[in-house]
Image: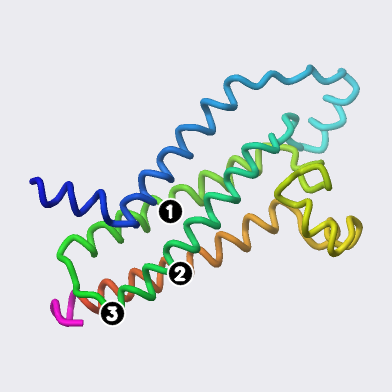
Amino acid sequence: MKSILKFLLTNRISILIALNIAVIIWIPWYEKGVEYEALLDSEYKVLSEMEMPTIPLNETICNIMIIAIIINIIVLAWESIKKRKKRFVKYDLMITFTYFSLVMFCMLLGAYYLSTKINAGIINENNPLFEFPIMILGKDLFTSIVTVTRLYISLCVIHLSICLFNLYLCIERYESGSTP
């Protein structure tokens, strides 16, 4: 039991699982403390007739989601590169499959969350996450190309591709045995 716990604490993918679960728990907790100003009746009628969401997306939550996905991409790509050289451990496949399942759940949950919010005003020069790209490309060009939904979907596609590759490596190494 002690060796399993030691392995989980040193395995980067299991640490990513804990990070993703922490982000999933943090978002509703943070959202609970945010208060929104009520819309005027005329604004609400227009938005409800267009079947659009009425609550704006919080900049902090959006930034945390994007940063968490980027961290997951970097760590998982690094682990995929290292996985080719290191010895197979019997828990790798189980942890990788659990991570893949959690990532799929997080991606669907994030897409649902973004679809229920108004995404306007997140990508601007006051947001520290987008300040440098806007400074280089200019606000009009950058905001015409990059939207919150497009950025989220593109990061999710990259992350999903790396997850599938990592899962493929684990299955291949599991079937071939424990030799590298």
Counting from the top left corner in percent of width and height, residue 25 is at 45, 33
Counting from the top left corner in percent of width and height, residue 17 is at 36, 49
Judging from the image, what secondary structure is the residue with disc 3 in?
Answer: loop
Residue 45: image tag: none
Q: Which of disc 3 and disc 1 is earlier in sequence?
A: 3
Q: Is residue 95 above or below residue 48?
A: below
Which residue sits at x=36%, y=44%? 18
Which residue sits at x=37%, y=68%? 79
Q: Which of disc 2 and disc 3 is earlier in sequence?
A: 3
Name the foreground residue: 41 vs 145: 145
* C-alpha distance separating marks 3 and 2: 17 Å
- Neighbour tally class for label 3: few under 14, some 14-19, many 20 plus, Cα within 10 Å: few
- Neighbour tally class for label 1: few under 14, some 14-19, many 20 plus, Cα within 10 Å: many
Residue 103: image tag: 1
Residue 85: image tag: 3
* C-alpha distance separating marks 1 and 2: 11 Å
Counting from the top left corner in percent of width and height, residue 149 is at 69, 53
Name the foreground residue: 85 vs 109: 85
Q: Is residue 168 left or right of residue 89?
A: right
Q: Is residue 129 left or right of residue 180?
A: right
Residue 34 lies in the magenta-colored region? no
Nearer mark to the viewer, of 3 and 2: 3
Residue for badge 2: 162
Judging from the image, what secondary structure is the residue with disc 1 in?
Answer: helix
Name the foreground residue: 3 vs 103: 3
Counting from the top left corner in percent of width and height, residue 80 is at 37, 72
Q: How is the image coloured?
A: rainbow
Which three-letter amino acid code belongs to the residue tagged 1?
Val
Q: Magenta residues, as a range?
A: 174-180
Which three-letter amino acid code belongs to the residue tagged 2?
Ile
